[in-house]
């Protein structure tokens, strides 16, 4: 009875042992027998102190803490302007299970919910102290506050006779473990926007950095270069596209200074000097949308052709193409790409101002095509110069002589920007003003892409109305004999000269 009285006088928590965040009951007599029969003042010092302080648990083992944030580099990288990859190193503590090698394949699927899901980090690592076992790394967010697994996971481990004891695993995180946005968020001042979006043009990445990012431009370029295999050059646009050639000045931020690149779009290869021509990979869907409207044998007039993203796939489809660009470098690379893709016999290339191109070769070919009694092909005119293409539409007003035949008239696809709250209405009204006619019910307007928060790129497509394309018959009659003066208009009370002569006789 004396033994049981002494046992009852001990705190119940002394009968529990804590292992790495898990708690297991131990009711074995020998575990506490050595303390029985001893006066309190003869108990080990820390137990006596616990008893004297009336605590209900054993003295706390240092709390097992795991790093919940595995996504942030070391804080010392804040404000870095020159990339120091070694400074990103950071040591973290990750929860883990020790598991026999032969059981790993059986556990990964059942324990999927609690396994580490950090890209770049292995979830199965070697145990340097035991070759027969490995560490299975766990998600620190999936571990309870008591540093233990859930009931279902413990049952799974029990079925394989594996201890549910969670242990610490020290992991070193390096520059290679972090993503672009994680690195840049750690480097740039807190609260500043981090732009990780870019356009890829072959081996070149093209950035549009904001003013607050410019002090960090070289590190931004280098980080993006490091994290994207196959990229060897990072550039930043230093001015807007405000010239007739549609190219812009750029600065090399990182990598090699090589602007001649190759791009593959919808199985078609293009080569060009990115610093001297216009190319936007975000328009690849729009290129194929327009080409999808064409049938073999159709005629395409590409007024601002660039290096050929509309012209070449149209020619590949079996269309006859007239392609023009004012930029001598675009003209050179357009010719090169036609030969590269073996469509140079189907594409007639011009290096002219867009207005001159419409007034001369396009007018001549339209006159010939529309005079045919039978014609199965359709005519399409693409005007992809969104900053000013609408200003060229007045060329179509009374461009052709004669009368419209029975064949269909050309369809125009004109691109433009809009900052209006209703861009569809805005674009249609601007085009109607240039043509001098209403297009209500005769056109369609498509959103191509959002260029900026308040700027949309739109495409309006419409068949040229006969009243717009052909000169009025009255003007044609007056032009039959340009040397013959127009007959003098008589006043209501004035007699014709012939009658006056007769009266005099």
Image (tube, helix red, strand yellow):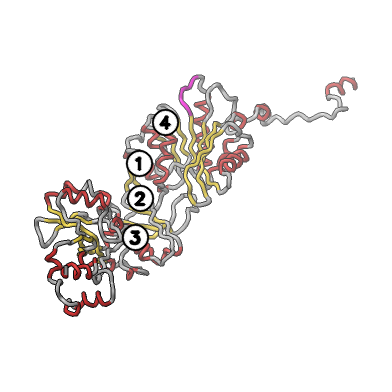
| Magenta span contains residue 164 | no
Q: What is the x, y in percent for residue 261?
A: 32, 49
Mark carried by residue 320: 4
User: Mark 4 or mark 2, which is nearer the start of the sequence?
Assistant: 2
Distance from disc 2 to disc 4, alpha carbons, whole Å, reads 30 Å
Look at the image and tell me whether residue 390 can be seen: yes
How many callouts does the rendering have?
4
Q: What is the x, y in percent for residue 473?
A: 65, 27
Q: In 3D space, how far apart are the residues under numbered discs 3 and 2 (Cα atoms)? A: 21 Å
Q: Are marks 3 and 2 in contact (CB under 8 Å)?
A: no
Quadrant location of the N terminus in the rendered image = bottom left
Circle 4: element type:
strand
Report the residue marked by disc 3: 182
Q: Is residue 61 visible?
A: no
How far separated are the C-alphas under marks 3 and 4? 50 Å
**Residue beneath label 2, please?**
200
Residue hosting label 1: 265
The image quadrant that residue 321 belongs to is top left
């Amino acid at each position: 009875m004396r033994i049981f009285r002494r046992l009852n006088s001990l705190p119940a928590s002394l009968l529990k042992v804590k292992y790495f965040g898990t708690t297991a009951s131990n009711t074995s007599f020998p575990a506490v027998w050595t303390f029985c029969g001893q006066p309190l003042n003869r108990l080990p010092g820390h137990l006596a102190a616990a008893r004297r302080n009336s605590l209900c648990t054993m003295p706390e083992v240092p709390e097992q803490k795991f790093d919940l944030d595995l996504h942030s580099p070391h804080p010392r990288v804040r404000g870095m302007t020159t990339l120091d990859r070694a400074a990103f190193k950071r040591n973290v503590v990750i929860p883990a299970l020790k598991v026999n090698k032969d059981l790993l394949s059986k556990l990964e699927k059942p324990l999927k919910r609690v396994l580490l899901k950090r890209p770049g980090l292995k979830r199965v690592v070697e145990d340097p102290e035991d070759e027969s076992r490995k560490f299975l790394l766990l998600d620190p967010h999936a571990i309870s506050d008591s540093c233990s697994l859930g009931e279902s996971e413990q049952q799974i481990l029990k079925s394989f006779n594996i201890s549910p004891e969670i242990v610490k695993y020290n992991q070193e995180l390096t520059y290679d473990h972090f993503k672009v946005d994680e690195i840049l968020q750690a480097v740039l001042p807190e609260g500043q926007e981090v732009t990780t979006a870019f356009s890829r043009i072959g081996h070149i990445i093209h950035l549009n950095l904001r003013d607050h990012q410019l002090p960090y431009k070289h590190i931004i370029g280098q980080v993006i270069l490091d994290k994207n295999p196959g990229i060897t050059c990072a550039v930043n646009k230093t001015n807007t596209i405000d010239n007739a050639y549609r190219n812009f000045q750029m600065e090399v931020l990182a990598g090699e200074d090589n602007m001649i690149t190759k791009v593959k779009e919808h199985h078609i290869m293009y080569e060009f000097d990115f610093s001297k021509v216009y190319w936007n990979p975000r328009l690849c869907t729009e290129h194929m949308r327009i080409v999808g409207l064409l049938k073999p044998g159709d005629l395409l007039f590409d007024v601002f052709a660039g290096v050929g993203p509309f012209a070449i796939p149209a020619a590949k489809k079996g269309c006859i193409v007239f392609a023009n660009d004012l930029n001598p470098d675009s003209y050179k690379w357009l010719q090169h790409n036609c030969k590269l893709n073996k469509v140079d016999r189907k594409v007639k290339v011009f290096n002219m101002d867009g207005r001159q191109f419409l007034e001369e070769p396009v007018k001549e070919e339209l006159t010939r095509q529309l005079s045919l009694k039978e014609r199965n092909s359709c005519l399409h005119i693409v005007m992809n110069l969104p900053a000013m293409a609408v200003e060229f539409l007045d060329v179509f007003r009374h461009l052709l002589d004669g009368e419209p035949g029975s064949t269909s008239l050309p369809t125009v696809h004109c691109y433009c920007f809009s900052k209006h709250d209703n861009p569809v209405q805005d674009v249609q009204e601007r085009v109607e003003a240039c043509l001098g006619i209403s297009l209500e019910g005769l056109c369609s307007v498509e959103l191509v892409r959002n260029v900026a928060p308040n700027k949309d790129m739109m495409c309006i497509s419409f068949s040229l109305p006969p009243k717009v394309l052909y000169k009025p018959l009255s003007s044609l009659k007056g032009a039959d004999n340009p040397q013959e003066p127009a007959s003098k208009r008589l006043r209501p009370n004035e007699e014709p000269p012939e009658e006056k002569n007769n009266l005099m006789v």
